[in-house]
Amino acid sequence: MSREDALVTVQWVEDNLDTPGVVLVEVDEDTTSYDKGHIRGAIKLDWTTDLQDQVRRDFVNKAQFEALLSERGISNDDTVVLYGGNNNWFAAYAYWYFTLYGHADVKLMDGGRKKWELDSRELTDELPTREKTTYTAQEQDTSIRAFRDEVVAAIGSQNLVDVRSPDEYAGRLLAPAHLPQEQAQRAGHVPTSVNVPWSKNANDDGTFKSEADLQALYAEVGFDESLDTIALCRIGERSSLTWFVLQELLGKKNVKNYDGSWTEYGSLVGVPVALGDEPGEA
Amino acid sequence: MCGATEGGLSLDGVNTKIEAVIQGQVTRSGDPVPNAYVRLLDRTGEFTAEVPTSATGHFRFFAGDGEWTLRTLAPKAEPVDTRVVAAVGSVAEVAVAI
């Protein structure tokens, strides 16, 4: 995987708005942004209702994912191009999700909705119609999904990359600063995890930094190329973006996203927690 | 009294006693800008959060005690940086003109 395979530019999207087999999908943290205007032809996936089980804390299962994509008119052989706000935060989560269920051809629009808007490109409120399909998903690829026991076992022995903002990592905030801060769990981070805020992967306009800059970003915090890697954040979405950078743009091997992330880890009984700006000891 | 100033975002449903709220409105020549992006940078200049403005140009963050910078990006405008001090239990109202 490389930048050419995983990313398309906003210009490419504009040039391919009518290309058969290319499906644009908006996935936004603010699930109402699509309704205020979207790229022509794009469909919407709602991360809170479409991509999460509505009873237990987990993803939709294979059958639910198949039903969702079939109903929205996405085929197995479609090129799915994802975009969203906030540096493609939730679009990257959807990218990871499509990869988890084995979709063959999925890409992110570099810069996401913000880049599109800052370029003053056209948005519409017209809703597209797509024929239903019969989508077949693969079993979940757990080589890219980490669970809590793996994270505890990885302390001091793998690259643990905590991608939250420095204040969340240190324990001074419990959630991203545009969300209310009340939470039940403890603040802090997994001992030995390094802090590389997800936002450092992107330029101000939301596009990804160059490979050289990204490589340097991780080298700077002592990323060990010989070890496996787990990325985590608060609820596993910002870390999807870092997973995307490490595995899809930089081609690193054995990178997992821990979707339980701090809201799970910080509520576990008896696990070690580090406070402050330093990684801490194993 | 630390409620929203006149014309600010409604604070209904927000427990302002436990939050350090930073909120405001982005305007261009006095008109609200609904398609701007406001980024919250911490005291070291590090990105902490970003929100798109609402239809009325409003934005809101739940920060912590201390100094912050708002960086506002909008089509056909240079980025604008605005310093703001937030404190738990109060609402910092910020007007951003681009």
Image: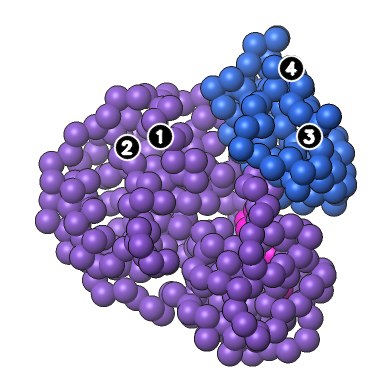
Chain colours: A purple, B blue
* Cα gap from disc 2 to disc 1, whole angstroms: 9 Å
Judge the density around disc 1: few (<14), some (14-19), many (≥20) Cα neighbours within 10 Å: many
**Which residue is labeled 4 in the image?**
B6
**Which residue is labeled 3 in the image?**
B91
Label 1 close to label 4 by CB (< 8 Å): no
Could you tell whether B54 is left or right of A146 in the image?
Answer: right
| Amino acid at dot 2 | Ala
Could you tell me if residue B68 is visible in this image? no
* Cα gap from disc 1 to disc 4, whole angstroms: 30 Å
Of mark 4 and mark 3, the one earlier in the sequence is 4
Identify whether A60 is placed above or below A68.
Answer: below
Along the viewing direction, whichever of A52 and A65 lies nearer the viewer: A52
Q: Chain of mark 4?
A: B
Of mark 2 and mark 1, the one earlier in the sequence is 1
Judge the density around disc 3: few (<14), some (14-19), many (≥20) Cα neighbours within 10 Å: many
| Amino acid at dot 3 | Val
